[in-house]
Image (spheres, rainbow, N blue to C red):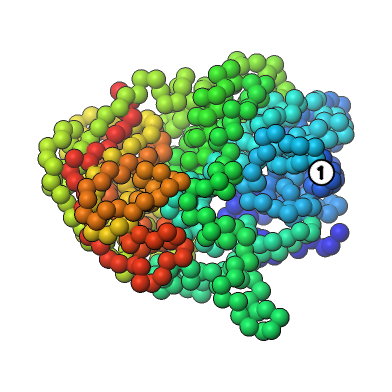
Amino acid sequence: MKKHIFSSITFLLISFFLFNCTPTAKNDIEKKDTFVADNYTKQEVDIEMRDGIKLHTTIYSPKDTSKKYPILMQRTPYSSAPYGEGKLKPKIGPNVHLMKEGNIIVYQDVRGRWMSEGVYDNMRAYIPNKKENQSDEVSDTYDTIDWLVKNVENNNGNVGTWGISYPGHYATVSTIDAHPALKAASPQACIGDFFFDDFHHNGAFLLSYFRAISLFGTYKDTPTDSAWYSFPKMNTQDQYQFFLDKGPLKNLNEYFQYDKLDVAGTEKKDRIDDFFWKEIVEHPNYDSVWKSKGIIQHLDKVPSSVATMIVGGWFDAEDLYGPLETYKAIEKHGKENYNTLVFGPWDHGKWARNTVKNTVGNYYFGDSISLKFQSEIETKFFNHFLKGSGDKNSGLPEAYVFDSGKLEWKSYDSWPPENATKESWYLSDNQKLTADKKSNSAIKFISDVKRPVPYSEDIKTVFTPRKYMTDDQRFAARRPDVLVFETDILTEDYTLAGDILAKLKVATTGTAADWIVKVIDVHPADVKENNEGLQDHLKMSNYHLMVRSEVLRGRFRNSFENPEPFVSNKKTDVNIKLQDVFHTFKKGHKLQIQVQSTWFPLIDLNPQTYVDNIYKADEKDFKTQTHTVFTDSSIEFSVLK
């Protein structure tokens, strides 16, 4: 084996994605903790799959062999490192409690990643009726579990899977056509469908994820213990200006031509070497490629013998769709399944941190929230199904959810709660959000392709954006191309619990447009305290907390499979589903809705002139247009009385 090299690229990868590789904060990683070395032995094996491909697997077994232990497994594309004899992770398992009480902890590099053989496929499609020697991630998981329970000493025959983000997706995969030994799975921030998670939101491309493309699309067909990919260099600290200057998306192709010169020494301007970027460019619509990669539609194949606990964060910028839709799909198809939901006031993977203070961006939600989850929920779940009786009387609620307005946990027998009802509020003149439809007037604004609305007022570059999910939205509310509608000051608490549907009535002078809706909690002006960590230019007085937001690429308003242009100046229905919230707008606050058409560079810039494929649009296609929102538009909330 080559000497293991953790390059700066790999460290960057771990910094952003690595709640997936180890559940500790950076300062914990840097501590000299000898617990794993003192209490575990490490073994590295290559497990052969049914088609002959070998997957690199690292097994940590307790040194105390006086009893048998369950197996807790994570499959990951982000490396099961460190590789090599005597090199150990400083922390293993989902949390410190499960590590210290003793479990067999397993990490595996998925097919085509790091030290595993084969060629990687991003969100490899599930094959429902496999022929002999056909493999997918479902069969790879099954074959791995089968080998582990037969070959790892002192295992009790029970297996659990967990993971955050992409490893969360593989935890979901483990539940489909599951091995009989799999008793518990906890998909956390799990990817559900790449047309709605991570790189797309309702068909709009997440331009802000541009630098992460090569992480998943750089070709490799041999095992390696060091990074084989590199990230594009932006050479600026102003990402807004960088992407504005770059212009159409096709101008980014140059960053995905890894071998720019052919044998004659001439540049191949049109070639795309990155297979993930090529997939995105060539498949702008929700076609068979994206559908085949989605996992939500296969969750009718989760047996009742597998208990699931789906975990997510209300302010997770990467994967909010995935865990919510995963829970709902299992709930829909598995009436006899033990299936629970945990959602807290976290961004991507923060529930795995060992920090006391829980903040997302500028906003403080309380202390020890993640620690409480780890000790009282996650550990209890795995212990009950892997070491205990394994019946449905786990002592845990069906839905354990954090009210991000009241700052408190609540337990419910279902999600959304059974007593949640639908209420509609209407957009009205004079920036009012009213309970009654009062007019049918038209509010116009200019959507300037040279001055798109920023998603953040921060001047910086980020690898994947997270902080904006709780950012103060005053900067946007004060732009003429952002429409604002808000209630009067609330005289009593108003709790939203469930999904939100924006029913917009719009028109445009062009033939294409994106539509963005944001739900904002406007804090009272007399709030004096400012939490530690608040950016210097902000105050909590009148803070505009973004509670939920979503975009719909307008061409997909009727079908994600078959896009269509707008008819210029024609009033048109655009319905946007916003993911679930659990938030109380407290007495003295206001509920605000913002409507806009650009959100840059979180999402790419719409030409506002219809083209078949935006990834191939030319500069001439981008035109400033005037958009209209009609005041018979409404927002439908799920309200908990």
Q: Position of residue 203 (x, y in %)?
A: 44, 50
Closer to us: 334 or 506: 506
On screen, residue 598 above or below 581: below
Q: Position of residue 334 (x, y in %)?
A: 57, 22
Task: Quadrant for the N terminus, please.
Answer: bottom right
Closer to us: 490 or 224: 224
539 lies left or right of 290: left
Q: Position of residue 330 (x, y in %)?
A: 55, 27
Q: List the residue tagged with mark 1.
A: 51
Is any atom of residue 478 visible in this view?
Answer: no
On screen, residue 211 above or below 142: below
Task: Quadrant for the C terminus, please.
Answer: top left
Q: How many marks?
A: 1
Farthest-out residue, bottom? 265
Q: Residue at x 53, y 59 (%)?
A: 282
466 lies left or right of 67: left
On screen, residue 504 above or below 596: above
Q: How many C-alpha atoms fall within 10 Å of the one at disc 1: few (<14), some, or many (≥20)?
A: few
Is any atom of residue 154 visible in this view?
Answer: yes
Closer to us: 618 or 32: 618
Q: Residue at x 35, y 36 (%)?
A: 500
Residue kind at label 1, given as amino acid type: Asp
Residue 621 location, quadrant: bottom left
Q: Residue at x 32, y 24 (%)?
A: 421
Residue 514 location, quadrant: bottom left
Determine the secondary structure under disc 1: loop
Q: Residue at x 33, y 37 (%)?
A: 501
574 lies left or right of 203: left
